[in-house]
């Protein structure tokens, strides 16, 4: 029996206040943003399971995006903030050696960047943070020590809050993909 591998949590529960609606299903090149992120995650065969956390727009997302290849969980307390989504996703993963965390509004992250972030996760670190031009971004990889802290997260905080005093390996991926996080309709138009 092999050791548990890498799971993936895609955070897609937000309300999209700055965007003005369900940005998870906003179209980029004719496809929902979440669909593009899922393509990247599913393009890394070592990720199993891939869990998508829905919330504010769950019904609309289920209608617009093919979720048949992933595990779907709803964060009923999504309005609390990102911590609720992360808790729901990590709980749904089950036993994994580490979890890759992706955001539904980062459509340009590639399978190569995801796989490289996983390659940077070793027994000498507790987490991996991907940088773009020196600025923290996603994916992040959370090991067992960090995953154990996730159930205690509260509020509108993400993985950064549980990575404060652990061994974090940072690596630069700015040369590998566009790290744009789509927060407004204007950003979507510029990216199209």
Image (cartoon, rainbow, N blue to C red):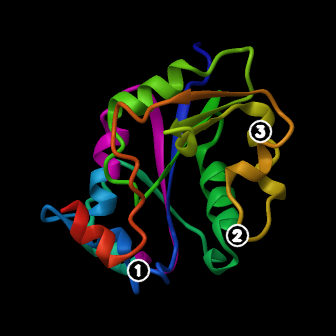
Q: CA distance from mark 1 to mark 2?
A: 17 Å
Viewed as shown, does residue 91 lie left or right of 35?
A: right
Mark 1 surroundings: few (<14), some (14-19) or many (≥20) residues within 10 A: some
Instruction: Please provide percent x and percent y for residue 115.
Output: 43, 26
Secondary element at image label 1: loop
Image mark for residue 38:
none
Question: Between disc 1 and disc 2, whose residue precedes?
Answer: 1
Q: Tags 3 and 2 in contact by the CB under 8 Å rule? A: no
Front disc: 3 or 2: 2
Q: Quarter-wise, where is residue 116 in the image?
A: top left
Front disc: 1 or 2: 1
Of 153 and 92, the residue lying toward us: 153
Instruction: Please provide percent x and percent y for residue 32.
Output: 25, 65
Question: Between disc 3 and disc 1, whose residue precedes?
Answer: 1
Of 125 and 74, the residue lying toward us: 125
Of 180 and 20, the residue lying toward us: 180
Quarter of the image that includes the C terminus = bottom left
Viewed as shown, does residue 35 lie left or right of 125?
A: left
| Residue that mark 1 sits on | 19
Q: CA distance from mark 3 to mark 1?
A: 30 Å
Q: Is residue 40 above or below residue 103?
A: above
| Residue that mark 2 sits on | 156
| Residue that mark 3 sits on | 146
Q: CA distance from mark 3 to mark 2?
A: 18 Å
Q: Residue at x 32, y 41 (%)?
A: 40
Question: Is 167 contained in the magenta span?
Answer: no
**Residue 100 in view of the camera:** no
């Amino acid at each position: 029996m092999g050791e548990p591998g890498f799971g993936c949590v895609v955070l897609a529960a937000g309300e999209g206040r700055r965007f003005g609606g369900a940005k998870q299903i906003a179209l980029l090149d004719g496809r929902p943003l979440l669909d593009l992120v899922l393509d990247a995650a599913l393009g890394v065969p070592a990720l199993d399971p891939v869990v998508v956390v829905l919330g504010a727009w769950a019904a609309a997302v289920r209608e617009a995006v093919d979720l048949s290849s992933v595990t779907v969980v709803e964060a009923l307390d999504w309005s609390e903030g990102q911590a609720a989504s992360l808790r729901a996703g990590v709980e749904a993963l089950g036993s994994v050696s580490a979890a890759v965390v992706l955001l539904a509004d980062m459509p340009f992250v590639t399978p190569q960047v995801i796989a490289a972030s996983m390659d940077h996760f070793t027994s000498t670190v507790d987490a991996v943070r991907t940088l773009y031009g020196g600025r923290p971004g996603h994916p992040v990889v959370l090991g067992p020590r960090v995953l154990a802290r996730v159930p205690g997260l509260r509020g509108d905080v993400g993985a950064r809050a549980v990575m404060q005093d652990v061994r974090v390996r940072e690596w630069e991926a700015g040369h590998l993909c566009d790290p744009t996080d789509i927060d407004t309709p204007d950003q979507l138009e510029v990216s199209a």
